[in-house]
Amino acid sequence: MRRFLYAGAALLTAAALVAGPGGTAYAAPPVNGTTVVTGTPTAGVPLAVQVTLYGVYPIVPYDFSLENRCWFGGRFAGPADSYETYPLLGPWYAAGSGATSSETVNLNDVPAGSVCKASISRGTSPVKGSITAYSVTD
């Protein structure tokens, strides 16, 4: 019985530490971001994308990633035909002004006439304001 009592007390102590004095769990402050296609999206040619994150804390390595999804049919419908994820290495820090990195997206297997979206994600959640749509040309 004592074993269960000690385990329960430890569990309550851990919950109190996570919740903090106000009774709510701590979470990282929100981050906004932008993606800007800096080159011409051409089939079979790598594409430069500028990634900027705005927040009030340092961006740690591998916490965020650049996602590039393409639909070969020319419409944003159904599952993407091409999907790649590029981890953002960091660490970056630029309080208030935004932390910027330049990334290269692979369009080698993407045919002309495709439509694509570049965005920043944190885990499985997209970062607010970071989706950029573009069309691939010859």
Image (cartoon, helix red, strand yellow):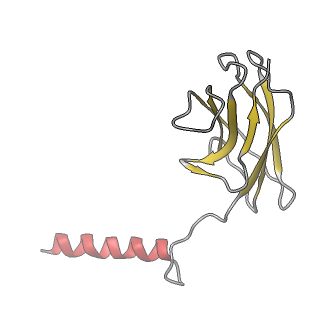
For the N terminus, the image quarter is: bottom left
How far from the left and from the top, in percent, is residue 106? 70, 23
Q: Is residue 132 left or right of residue 22?
A: right
How far from the left and from the top, in percent, is residue 126? 62, 50
**Residue 132, placed above or below residue 69:** below
Residue beneath the point at 72% across and 49% down: 130
**Residue 131, placed above or below residue 9:** above
Residue beneath the point at 65% across and 16% down: 109
Farthest residue in the left direction? 1
Write down the quadrant of residue 136 in the picture.
Answer: top right
Residue 88 seen anywhere in this rendered image of the structure: no
Residue beneath the point at 55% across and 70% down: 26
**Viewer-proximal residue, 129 or 7?**
129
Write down the quadrant of residue 96 in the picture.
Answer: bottom right
**Viewer-proximal residue, 64 or 78?**
78
For the C terminus, the image quarter is: top right
Count of numbered circles in the view? 0
Residue beneath the point at 49% across and 82% down: 23
How far from the left and from the top, in percent, is residue 81? 56, 27
Residue 54 seen anywhere in this rendered image of the structure: yes
**Viewer-proximal residue, 123 or 16?**
123
How far from the left and from the top, in percent, is residue 112? 73, 20
Q: Is residue 123 left or right of residue 29?
A: left
Q: Is residue 77 left or right of residue 68?
A: left
**Viewer-proximal residue, 47 or 115?**
115
